[in-house]
Image (spheres, rainbow, N blue to C red):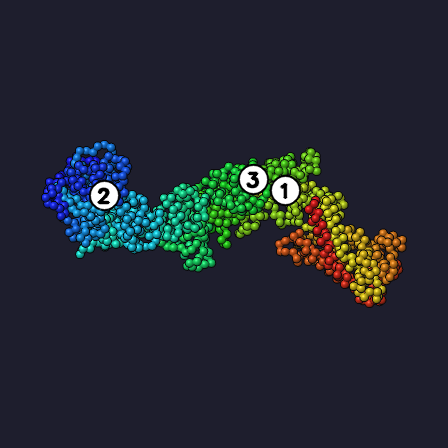
Amino acid sequence: MRLCGCIPLTLLALVALSTTTQVAWNSDPTIQPGTLVDVLNNDEDYTSLLSLLQKAKLIPTLNKLNGSTLFAPTNDAIKRHDLWRSALEYPTLLKDNVQEELRQQLFYHLLNYSVTEDPKDSTTLQVLDTLHFPKLSLDSPTNKPPPYPPWIPIPESSLGNQSQKLRLTSRDGVAWVGVDAFGKGGIEVKKQKVEAVNGVVYGIAHVLEVPPDLGRVLSHEPSLSYFQKVLTPSMLNVINSTSELTLFIPVDSAWEALDPIERVYLESQFAADDLQRVLNMHAVIEKSVRWSNTFESTTTLTTEYGSSLEVAISEGKTTVSGATLLQPDIYASNGVLHIVSSLLVPPGALQLTPEKYLLALNCTSFISLIHSVNLTHLINDTETQYTILAPKDDVLSVFENGGLPKQGSDELKKVLQYHFLPGKWTPEKLTDGMLLESVLREPGLDGGRQVMHVEVNDDEKQDAPSRHIRFGGAGITGEHIVINNAVVYFISSPLEPPVDPLQTALPSLELSSFLAAVFSTSIADDIKKTPRATFLMPHNAAFKRLGKLVSDHLLAASSKTDLENVIMHHIINGIEYSQSLVDGSLRTFATLEGSDLQLERLSNSSVIVGPSGGWAGMKSALYPTNILTETGVIHELSDLMIPRSVELNVGKLMKAAKATTMINMVTKAGFDWILDGTAPPEGSKWADQGLGGASWTLLCPTDDAFKKYNLTQLLENIDVLRALVSQHLIRTSPSTGESGSFNVFDALNNNRPLPLEDLGEYPTLLSPSSAYGDIVFRALDDKVSKYMVGIKNARGTDKQADWARVLTWGRTTTGGGTGGVITIDRMLVPYHPPWWVEYFVPSFVGTLGSSEAPAAEEAKNSAIDNVKSFIAGGFGGVSAVLVGHPFDLTKTRLQTAAPGAYTGAIDVVRKTLARDGVTGLYRGMVPPLLGVTPIFAVSFWAYDASKNLILALTPKRTSEKLSTAELAAAGFMSAVPTTLITAPVERAKVLLQVQGQGGSGPQYKGVFDVMKHLYREGGIRSIFRGTGATIARDGPGSAVYFAAYEVTKKAVMPAGSSAGDLNLGAIMFAGGTAGVAMWSIAIPPDVLKSRIQSAPSGTYSGLFDCFRKTVARDGITALWKGLGPAMARAFPANAATFLGVEASRKLMDGFF
C-alpha cells in the first residue's frame, strides 16, 4: 500500500477551518473535551474499537485529524462482525503490518469533516464523503514499517479518485447511517454525539459494511435476478475489473419485452457476445462515476456500446431514455448501480438470428458443434440467405458416442459446412433429383462447392406442407421454418459429406467387380484423389457380358496395363452431373486414359456411351445416378468399355483361356498371324486367297481336349495339322455395329464372336477344300453349356470327334473389331466319311437336329449315365407294377371270364381276396416285374429315336420343336420295338392272372413254367401269340400317351422355365394324365389281346376273328370290359412310373 508522508492540501484546508470543540449531548459544559482517541478511551463501549484502531495503526491518524467525524461501532456491534471480532480474537490472522483490509473498513467509518448538526433533527438525506478510497485490489501486504505520520489516505480510487459515499438521515427522531437512496435501511446511531477537539463521535449499533464491487452489489438485488441469471463469468469479470463504471440495469419485468426466442438465446451458453453487447448498452464509463446528483435536468451519456442515454429530470422524476430510474445510487467499490424500469436497447440492436431460433427449437447440440469449429457466422449472419439442415438434440444424441468427428476438428468442420446451403430453398422451389450447392468447398473439386442430392415425392402437391423431402438421403422431421434470411429443415440424421469415389462405391454390391479390378492395380490411390473426376462404373454383370476370356485377360497379372487403361477410360476428366449428360449439348468427353467417350442421346431419353475402341458395335447404357464423391460424381454403366489403347487379339484371348496346346498348334501350322491379328505374310497362299482384311473366330479346344491324342503325331504332319487348325478357323464377316436404337440386353450377345443364339451354319477355312468343312451351332439343354458346335453332316464317329460343347468366348478388337475365340471341350477332327455314306446315304444332320439328342447321346457315351438310366427306368416300371397290378389283374379277369362269372370289378376283388387272400391280387406280377425294365428302357429310347428321325426327315423345318401330331407319331413308332418284349411278357402275365378263375386250380407254378409250357405247346409262335393285338393296343395308346404327356407338361410349366424346372408333383400329374388318355382308347384292343393270349390254342384265328366272336357272343359292350379297373389303374400307375424314374434319378445324382 502506498502511504503519504504529508496531509493533502484539501485535507489541510479542512483542518485549518475546523474550529469545532468536543461537547457531549446534554453534557456538563464545564468539562474540557479531549481528542477523538480520548473520547473513545473514556467510554467503555469503545474498548474493542480502540484495540482495532491500534492494530490498524490509525491512532496517530485520529490524533492528527482536525474537524473529523467518526461513526464508532460499540463493543456489541464489533462482536457481531466476523472480521472485526476475528481480528481481536485471532490477531495472527491479520498478517500484513498495517492490516490494510481492516484499515479500509475503519476509514469507511471516518469523515474528514465534522457533522455537527444533530442528524436526528435533520429532515433531509445527507450524502457524506468518507476517507475510504476503494481500489480494484488492495495493495500487497508488507512487513515494512509505515511511513511517518500523519497517516492519511491518498485520494486515488476506482471511483474517479473520489472517496466512497455514505448516507445519513433520520426516521421518527432516530438517526440512521448507511441508508439507501430513499433513506431506508442503514444502521441506527445508538449513542449521543460526543464532541472532541478534533471532531465528533457517533456511536452506532453495527459495523458499517464497505460497499463491495459491482458484481456482488448486483447479486444482492432481488429485482435483478434475471440479469444475474444470464450474467456470464466473463461479464462479471468485466464488471468487477472496470473502474468508474456506471450501470443502468433493468428490473426483471423489463426483460419480458424481448422476444421469447431472444430470451431463450440469452439464457443459453452461446449468448456471450449478445450479453456483452446488452451490458455495454447499459454501461457508462467516464472519468468520474455518474451518481444521480451529477445529473442535470437534461444529460446525455454515451454507453460502451456507443448508444446515447438521455437523462431527464422533471417534477422530481428521473428517466433514462424513457426508462424510469427506479432506484438510484447503489454504491459499489468500482462504480455505482442505477436500477431502471426497462431495457435501454437501441432499436435493431438485437436481431433474431438463426442461431437463436435453433436454440429455442432444441438444436443446442448442433449449435455447440458449430461453435467448436468457429462457424458461428453461418448462424448469425442476418443478410446472407442460407438453407440450414439442422439435426435436433434427440437425433444427435444417438451419434454422441463416436458417431461424429471430434469437436473442434477439421473433419467436423467439413461435416457442419455440408449442412448449410446458400440460398433460401423453400419446399415449393425444390424438385426431385436437383443438386444444391453447399457451403463446403472441397479441394477435390478444385475449391468448388460440394453439392447435395435432393429427393422430392412428386406424388405430393407442390405447395403441400406434408410434401416428402430428403436432403442427401436424410429425411425431414416436422415442419420447416423461415427465419428472415434463412429457412431451416430439421433432418432425421446428420449428413456426411461425400468421400472419395472408391470408398463411396464400396457399399454397392452391384459395383464390387469394378472396384475389385481397380484395387488390383497400382492406380487406385491416384484416381481416388484425382480432382474433378466423373466415374462411370459398370455393374458386375458387365464383366460377364464382356465375355469370360476378355475378363480373364484384363484381370490377369500380365495385363495390368490393359486393365489400367480400361479403368482410366471410365473416368471423365471433369464433373458431369446427370443434367449435363442427359440434357447437355456436348457429345464428346475426354477421359483420363487420353481418348474420348462418345455420348448418344436417344429419343426415349436414354443415353448411350461409346468407347474410343473395343469391338464393332460396343456400346453401354448410361444410368445417370449422381452418386456424389468428394472429387466429383459417379454414374453407372450397363457394360464395360474398351479404349483404343487396349488391343485384344486372338493370341491374348487364347492365353486367357490357358489353351497352350492350341496356341502351339496354330503357330506350328503357320497361322501365327491370326494370333497377332495381322494380315497373312505376303506371298503366302492365304494372302493370295485375299484373306488379308479378314477377321477370324477360332474354335479353341481346351488343353484337356488333347489328352487322348498323340500330339507328336499331330505336329509332325503339317498337312494334317493345317487341316485340323483350319477346321477350327471361321472367317468372320465385318460389322459396323451401328443401329438406330440400343437395347441393353443386346450387349449380352454383342460380346460373342458369333451370334450363337441364331444357331447358324458357318464355313471354316477348311470348307473350300472339304465337303465337310462347315460347322453348325445348336442349342443344348445341358448343365455344362447352352450351345454345341459340330461338323455339318458328319456321321459314323459315334459323335466322339465331330461335335463339342461351347464353354466360353471372347471377342477381339483387331481386324475391324469382329471375330474372337470360342473355347470348346473337344477337338473337331476333320471328317472323312466311308464311300457308302458319302455316295448313298441321305445328307442330313441326324441326331444333331434334336435338342434332346446330344444329351441322350452323351448319356450313351457315359457308363454311369447308362446305369442311371437303366436303374431309373427299372424303378419306374417296378413302381407302376406295384401300384397298378391289382387293377390290371381285376381288368384281365373281367375281360377273360365267362359271362356272369363276375358282376363287376368289386366282385372280382371280393372273390379273389376270399379265395387267394391279398397275395391273390398280385398273382402274375413276376412277368411284368421281370419285363418292365427292358420294356420302359426300349419304350423311352424308341420314343426319343423316333423324334430324332422325324427331325432328320424334315431338314427345312422352321422350328426345332415338334408339333403335337409329330409327338404322337413318334409315340406310335416307339410301340413297334417295344412289342418284341411286351408281347411275350403280356402272354405269360395273362395266363398267370386267369388261372384259378372259375374255380379251376393253379395250372402254372410261375413265369418260367408258363414259358416252358407255351414253348412245348407251339414254340416261339405260341409265346408271341397276341403280338398283333399288342401293337394294335400300344401303337395308338403310345401315340396318345406321349402326346398327352408332352402337352400336359407344357401346360403346367411356369412361364420362362424349362422342363427340368418341373417338380415331382407336376411330373406325376403329367404322367397320370398321360395314362388316363392312353387307356381311354386302348381298352378294346386290350380286351382282344387278353382273350387271344388266354384262350386255348385254336380258339381264334387272329385279331379280327377274336373281335367277331367276342361281339357275337357277348355283345359290343364286351370290348369295354375292364374299363373301370383300367381307368382306376391308369392315373396312379403312370404317376408312380414317373415318380419312380425322377426320384431314383435325383437320388443317384446325389451319390455319383
Q: Position of residue 116 (x, y in %)?
A: 13, 46
**546 horizontally vs 720: left or right:** left
Q: Nearer the viewer, residue 203 or 739?
A: 203
What residue is pinned by disc 1? 823
**Which type of secondary structure does the marked residue at label 2 adopt?**
helix
Residue 968 appears anywhere in the view: no
Q: Which mark is residue 372?
A: none
Mark 2 surroundings within 10 Å by alpha-carbon count, few (fewer than 14), some (14 through 19), many (20 or more): some
Query: Which residue is found at the position 60% from the left and 36% from the top?
Result: 681
Lower position in the chain sequence, tag 1 or tag 3? 3
CA neighbours of label 3 inside 10 A, class few (<14), some (14 to 19), many (20+): some
- In this figure, which residue is indicated by the disc labeled 3? 555
Q: Nearer the viewer, mark 3 or mark 2?
A: 2
Query: x and y percent of residue 426 in the render?
Result: 39, 55
Question: Going by the image, does 992 lie left or right of 495?
Answer: right
Spot the residue most to the top. Answer: 144
The foreground one among 964 and 688 is: 964
Q: Amino acid at mark 3?
A: Leu
Q: Amino acid at mark 1?
A: Thr
- Which element type, helix, strand or loop, lies under badge 1? strand
Outermost right residue: 1016
> What is the spatial separation of the Cα atoms under label 2 and label 1, in whole angstroms?
120 Å
